[in-house]
Amino acid sequence: MNKPALLISALTLLSATTAHATEKFDPSQATEVPTKRWAKTERLDDPHPKMKQEKFIPLVAHHDPELAEDFGSKTPSSRYSLLHYAKGIEEADQSKTPVLLVHGAGLTSNHCYADKPIEQPYPGLAARLIADKIPTFALTFSHIHGDNYLQAEQVANAIARIRHVTGAKKVDLVAHSKGGVSTRIYVSSAGHEWMTKFREDVRRYVMLGTPNLGIDVSFAYPNLNYWILEHKSPAPMSWLNGLYYGKRIDWSDRTLYGPDSPFPGQAQLVERWDQRYGRTTSKGQFDVDSTYDGGKGLVSHSLGIDRAIKDGGHCIARLQKKPVHKSVELAVLAGSHSWVMGLVGERRGPSDGLLLVESAFATEPMEKDGAKLIRKDLRRFNHLELVYHPRANDWVAETLAMPTPKED
């Protein structure tokens, strides 16, 4: 057995206690699966009956051969998640708080955190943190647009496993975009009755472009529907049907509406911003009012933003009533560069191209029970650069290294 394998195996034996998530999940059990991008990858299995099979369409299935093999399917059940060990973890300082990286919508940890991420020009955040000798792990969700409550349970399971293999009492969490909502559900004990309540096992929660007060960009900018179609993007549409190259096409299987949507986690992120920032006045945008309010327009038919919010269970509004546990330290990085994915995105107010800065900065409801905000910064990154740009990665490393604030 080589040195990395020996040390990783030794880590598994360090814990003297078992940190349970749901009553069905056993953090001492994990299945090692093949990997080229990580030192080690494990498949975690939570057989709780609520960890269900979510709906997939081909666009949102796992097309990375490594991940499909590791899950055992391109369309895995939510009972499964993948925990990745960063390359170089065997050289990390085990006295430092371990870090769990949580990815956002449409991505996986192979896309944004791995040593050589898919479709990115820079080394991933995991490599940056390993350079600081931080024991670094990353999570890949079973569904890239999955239910945020189910994903919150996957976060809880990953934390339990990390504590088991390292012996650490607490873990730091770094979450990008939608992944921050799943993470917040856990650290706020905001999940359903059957779900894991917060176990006071998180030291610091770092948010990168997280929609803390929701997002409405797919309703506010209707032409994004055409961008999604042209780029074959695995993103949800706000139009049920519409004219496309002169033909009326039905897209109802690609929307975020209804209980059978393949984008349940996206509906949970939707919240209105038109009362604060209005609606786009950009020339060439089709059916602005009918898209936002619902109805038939010149080229499209939408059920509207209020229907999406309802179908998402009013998730954002619910979270505002659930503060983060007082033991957790909070940090936020938001972006101000509105060009993203080859398009001019959200322009009604300061944004990272998809998310309004005001939404990312909305931490006050989280702090009501005493959670401490230790850092809140705005930098010139777009929404995707927040998770992979070297300067953004440096910001994360600096934030994790900050000393714990002294009590007043």
Image (spheres, helix red, strand yellow):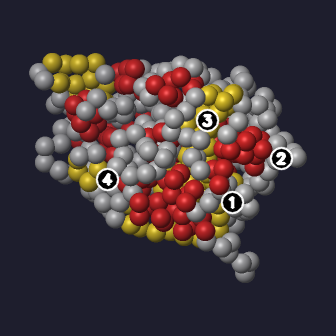
Separation of disc 2 and disc 1 at Cα?
16 Å
Q: Is label 2 in a helix, a strand or a loop?
A: loop
Q: Is label 3 in a helix, a strand or a loop?
A: strand
Residue lying furthest front: 2
Pointer 1 residue: 93
Pointer 3 residue: 41
User: Residue sitting at 46 percent across and 25 percent down?
Assistant: 65
User: Which image quadrant: the N terminus?
Assistant: top right
Q: Quadrant of residue 400?
A: bottom right
User: Which image quadrant: the C terminus?
Assistant: bottom right
Q: Residues within 10 Å of mark 2 (few under 14, many from 20)?
A: some
Q: Nearer the viewer, residue 334 or 97?
A: 97
**In front of the other: label 2 or label 1?**
1
Pointer 4 residue: 353
Marks 3/2 in contact by CB < 8 Å: the verdict is: no
Separation of disc 2 and disc 4 at Cα?
43 Å
Q: Is residue 174 above or below residue 233?
A: below
Closer to the chain start, of discs 2 and 1, is 2
Closer to the chain start, of discs 1 and 4, is 1
Separation of disc 3 and disc 4 at Cα?
33 Å
Residue 15: image tag: 2
Separation of disc 1 and disc 4 at Cα?
37 Å
User: Residue sitting at 23 percent across and 46 percent down?
Assistant: 342
Q: Residues within 10 Å of mark 3 (few under 14, many from 20)?
A: many
Marks 3/4 in contact by CB < 8 Å: the verdict is: no
Amino acid under disc 1: Asp
Amino acid under disc 3: Thr
**In front of the other: label 1 or label 4?**
1
Is residue 174 in view?
Answer: yes
Separation of disc 1 and disc 3 at Cα?
20 Å
Q: Is label 4 in a helix, a strand or a loop?
A: loop
